[in-house]
Image: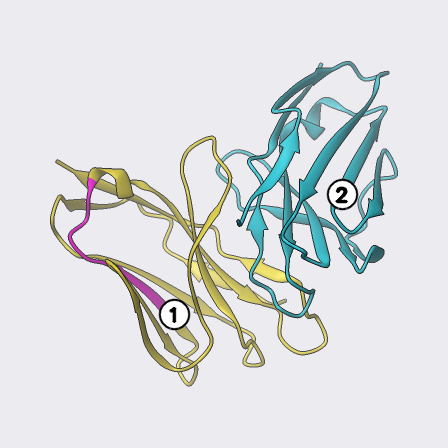
Chain colours: A cyan, B yellow
Amino acid sequence: DTEVTQTPKHLVMGMTNKKSLKCEQHMGHRAMYWYKQKAKKPPELMFVYSYEKLSINESVPSRFSPECPNSSLLNLHLHALQPEDSALYLCASSRQEAYNEQFFGPGTRLTVL
Amino acid sequence: QKEVEQNSGPLSVPEGAIASLNCTYSDRGSQSFFWYRQYSGKSPELIMFIYSNGDKEDGRFTAQLNKASQYVSLLIRDSQPSDSATYLCVVNAGSGNTGKLIFGQGTTLQVKP
């Protein structure tokens, strides 16, 4: 089973709202990732969790806050976003950080009004 | 700056033909190479990975790697309209950056019936 699930599929929020994106995998993978993808661009890495510890933070604004409650779950907390943050947010996982074969979830389409 | 270069296309081929997608990368230390397929509005799907010089075949897909030339390619035989998508060439960031993938801009493939 190579499935990564993400909820919600779509999210519309105002600039003053607080919301969370959720990601789950049951493949026993020990590395999980958040990416942001704008239209007609490749995914951009935001955060990497390896063995439930944040190992890479690509200088993402503090209005994005990741959380890894356990090895199967990854959350992305959103607060005071800007319209330019509207994008497809992708979660991915891999067997271990060095393994590199990353499997992506279906994504959350985020619109900030 | 570590880079992965792809022709953005569109690459247009008739149904049943061979589609050839090419990619070059700048980091000689890279060890892992991936091809992802992404349909419009969907998330990337891993279709091939290759670690060693030479060819790797999986069904209608063949990945080719030449580390001396820093060149990766994907051949799709008997192209079908359902192969129409954007193909992302992805390379690991080499030693000292395990887990971080460098994405090309993607090549759009159009297979015409």
Q: Depth check: B65 or B58 in front?
A: B58
Look at mark 2 in the image and give the residue it sits on. Answer: A73
Residue plotted at (80% across, 60% down): A51
Q: Tell me where the magenta segment starts and ends, as one range.
A: B72-80
For the residue marked with disc 2, what is the amino acid?
Leu
Residue closest to the eye, B39 or A73: A73
Q: Which mark is residue B40?
A: none
Q: Quadrant of the C terminus of chain A?
A: top right
Residue A23: x and y, percent? 70, 38
**Residue B63 sits inside the magenta stretch:** no
Q: Is residue B110 left or right of residue A59?
A: left
Res. B72 mark = 1
Whole-number angstrom distance, CA of label 2 to CA of label 1: 34 Å
Q: Are marks 2 and 1 on the same chain?
A: no
- Specify the subunit that label 2 lies on: A
How far from the left and from the top, in percent, is residue A21?
Answer: 74, 30
Please tell me which residue lies in front, B17 or B25. B17
Q: Quadrant of residue B77?
A: bottom left
Residue type indicated by callout 1: Val
Is residue B79 in the magenta section? yes
Q: Secondary structure at mark 2?
A: strand
Residue at the image position 86 percent from the left and 33 percent from the top: A63
